[in-house]
Amino acid sequence: MLCRESVVSAPPSTPADSIDPLELYAAAIDSSDYVMHVAPVVRRLAPPIGALLDVGAGGGQLGAALRKPSCPWTAIEPSPAMRSRLAALPQPPRIVAQGWEQADVATAAHDTVLAATTPALFDSERFLARCRRWARRTVVWIVPAQAGPRGICFAGCLPREWHGEDETPGVDLVLDRLPASMRPDAFAFASWTFTGIVRDLTRLSAWLADRLGWAMSDARRAMLVRHLEAQAKAHSEGHRLDIPRKSAVLVWGRS
C-alpha cells in the first residue's frame, strides 16, 4: 500500500462546520486502497508516464505513485489546503496554484496529463481539449464508474432518499457529453474501497446533515448518527467506514 492511514475527523471540540470537504476526502484517500488498485491500471494503459501533469492533484496520492522520480511532475491545484499537502510530500511536485481554466502551463510540455477531478464530469469537451493541448502523448482521466452519489464525501453511506443526488455513473456522464470524435482510445475499470477512519461519528453526521440542508430540528439527524454507527467498524482511532467504489480509467492518445 502506497498511502498512509489517516484520521479524517478532528476532535469532538472542533465544530462540524469547520470540516474542509477536500481535506476530508484526501484523508480518506490516504487510508483507502485507491492507489493500490487504480495506479496499475493507469500504468498498463498509458506507459510510459514520463513527464507528468497532474490536474486537480488534490493530496497527490495517485500522482506520487505514478510519477517517475527522474521526470518532472507538475500539479495544478487551486486549493490552499491541498497545496499544503502537496508541498509536504517527500518529493513534492512543482505546484501551479490555479484552476485548470487559468493554469499557465506550456503547450505539449508533459508526456502524460492526468486528471481525477470534477471538470471531466461537467465540462467534458472543453476540459478534454485543454488536457490535449498540454499533453505530448497521453491524457488519462479517472472518473467514477459506480452508480451512487458523487457530490458529498461519505454520501455513499446514506440511503438514496436522504442524499437525493443523481446516481448516474460519472463515466456515463462523461461519455454522453463527448462527441464521437473525442471518445477515449482505451479504457478499463478498477474496483477499490473508499475507507475513512473517523474519530467522531457524531461530528461527521452533523457535517453531513448540514451539507444536506437539514434543519437542526430535523429528526433524521439522530437517525443519521445511528445509521453511521450501524455501518462503522471498530478502529484504534475510532471508527472505520468502508464504501465500495469503482473507477473508470479513460485514455486518449495511447501509444
Image (spheres, grey):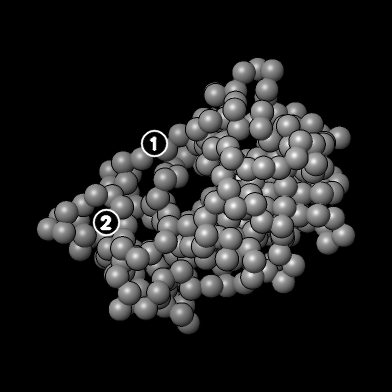
Q: Is residue 210 left or right of residue 157?
A: left
Residue at far top of view: 180
Mark closest to the chain's N terminus, 1 or 2: 1
Q: Is residue 33 above or below residue 116?
A: below
Q: Return the x and y of residue 238 as percentages of the image width and height.
A: 42, 78
Q: Is residue 176 left or right of residue 75?
A: left
Residue 209: which numbered mark, if any?
2
Q: Say which quarter of the image contains residue 134.
A: top right
Quick check: can you spot residue 150? yes
Residue 166: which numbered mark, if any?
1
Instruction: State the residue at coordinates (64%, 46%).
Output: 55
Where's the N terminus, which quadrant?
Answer: bottom right
Kindly identify the amino acid type of the residue bearing the numbered disc 1.
Asp
Instruction: State the residue at coordinates (64%, 66%).
Output: 87
Circle 1/circle 2 CB separation < 8 Å: no
Instruction: State the residue at coordinates (72%, 71%).
Output: 90
> For the image shown, how many numbered marks are present on the structure?
2
Q: Gap in Å between the C-alphas at discs 1 and 2?
A: 18 Å
Q: Return the x and y of residue 142 as percentages of the image width and height.
A: 63, 43
Q: Return the x and y of residue 182 as percentages of the image width and height.
A: 68, 22
Q: Say which quarter of the image contains residue 131.
A: top right
Q: Is residue 94 above or below residue 176?
A: below
